[in-house]
Image (cartoon, rainbow, N blue to C red):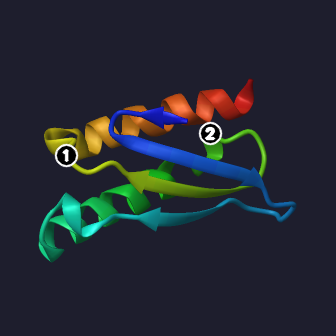
Amino acid sequence: MTSGGLQFVYKRNGQERSRVGLDVSRKVGKACRRNTVKRRLREVFRNHRGLLAGSFDVVIRVIPGSGELYSYRNIEQAFRKFAEKTAG
């Protein structure tokens, strides 16, 4: 599923909690920019993991060139859309 410059790949994991993996390529920017994006992704996942309907292994791939779409608010909106999709 792709939403807001992020691509979500997920699969049920059969464990008690969901886990996240991140794919942020060098095309996103220099190390400082990539690390900022990764910190935001982890924080959104940590705060909203309860919205997922079950336990999943989630890989979030950042699509290069999305620019301002890497803000916390946009990442949060994309994750909420993804969580809604897992529920239904």
Name the secondary structure under disc 2.
helix
Quarter of the figure with the N terminus: top right
First of labels 2, 1 by sequence position: 2
For the view shown, which residue lies furthest in the right direction? 14
Displayed quadrant of residue 34: bottom left
Q: Amino acid at mark 1?
A: Gly
Give above or below for 70 relative to 86.
below
- 64 left or right, relative to 56: left
Q: Residue, x 30% and y 66% (percent of image)?
A: 25
Q: Residue, x 80% and y 60% (percent of image)?
A: 13
Q: Amino acid at mark 2?
A: Leu
Could you tell me residue 19's position as x and y percent?
Answer: 63, 64
Q: CA distance from mark 2 to mark 1?
A: 28 Å
Could you tell me residue 74's position as x and y percent?
Answer: 29, 36
Could you tell me residue 51's position as x and y percent?
Answer: 62, 39
Name the secondary structure under disc 1.
loop
Give above or below for 58 relative to 7.
below
Tell me if label 2 and label 1 are in contact, CB under 8 Å. no
Q: Nearer the viewer, mark 2 or mark 1?
A: 1
Give above or below for 48 relative to 43.
above
For the view shown, which residue lies furthest in the top direction? 88
Q: Any mark on residue 65, and which? A: 1
Displayed quadrant of residue 29: bottom left
Please state the total of marks drawn on the protein image.
2
- 76 left or right, relative to 30: right
Quarter of the figure with the C terminus: top right
* Residue tagged 2: 51
Could you tell me residue 21's position as x and y percent?
Answer: 53, 66
Question: Would you call the spot at circle 2 few (<14 residues within 10 Å), some (14-19), or many (20 or more)?
Answer: some
